[in-house]
Amino acid sequence: MTDAQSPKTLGEVVKAERLKRHWSLRRAERETDVRNAHLAQIESGTIARPDHNVLFALAKAYDLNFERLLRLAGHISDESVSSRRSPYGAVAWKALTELNPDEQREVVDFIAEIQRRRGEGADDR
């Protein structure tokens, strides 16, 4: 595919990746857990700004760069990528809500441990 023919929109990128794998919309639904009608609307551009979680599922299934999909969907710009806020926050939040309370505490404890170690490392500078 030449540069002039390469996919430029989110819908074009997603559709090209699905077709490259020779997947039907139903197969893509099974692989992503996103309804095939929703996928069709993303591919056609009817849904131009799907939820972060949908984009993460597509990135994972199609082996695409999540930040690229976020950018194509208009969720982030080059300026926001350079900020401290991560585009993975919404995906992490959804994953956290799907855990039971004990698992949620374990995740929060793990994050606290990482922050503690980071704080200790800052003292060494």
Image (cartoon, grey):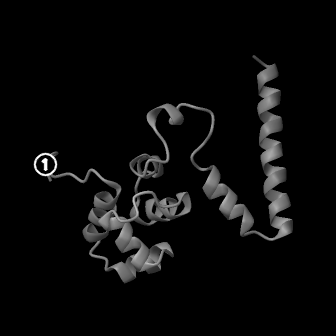
- Furthest toward the top, the residue is 125
Q: Residues within 10 Å of mark 1 (few under 14, many from 20)?
A: few
Residue nearest the viewer, comparing 76 with 6: 76
Total labels drawn: 1
Q: Residue at x 39, y 49 (%)?
A: 72
Q: Quadrant of residue 102?
A: bottom right
The residue identified by callout 1 is 2
Vertical relation: 8 (above or below) 121: below
* Left or right of 119 on screen, residue 14: left
* Image quadrant where one finds the C terminus: top right
Q: Circle 1 sits in a helix, a strand or a loop, which is it?
A: loop
Percent position of residue 30, x then y? 46, 80
Residue nearest the viewer, comparing 109 with 50: 50
Vertical relation: 49 (above or below) 87: below
Amino acid on which disc 1 is placed: Thr
- Furthest toward the front, the residue is 46
Q: Quadrant of residue 85?
A: top right
Percent position of residue 57, x then y? 50, 65
Residue nearest the viewer, comparing 98 with 11: 11
Percent position of residue 51, x then y? 52, 60
* Left or right of 80 on screen, residue 12: left
Percent position of residue 87, x then y? 57, 46
Q: Residue at x 41, y 79 (%)?
A: 36
Q: Residue at x 41, y 59 (%)?
A: 63
* Left or right of 98 on screen, residue 41: left
Residue nearest the viewer, comparing 118 with 58: 58
Vertical relation: 68 (above or below) 105: above
Q: Residue at x 73, y 62 (%)?
A: 96
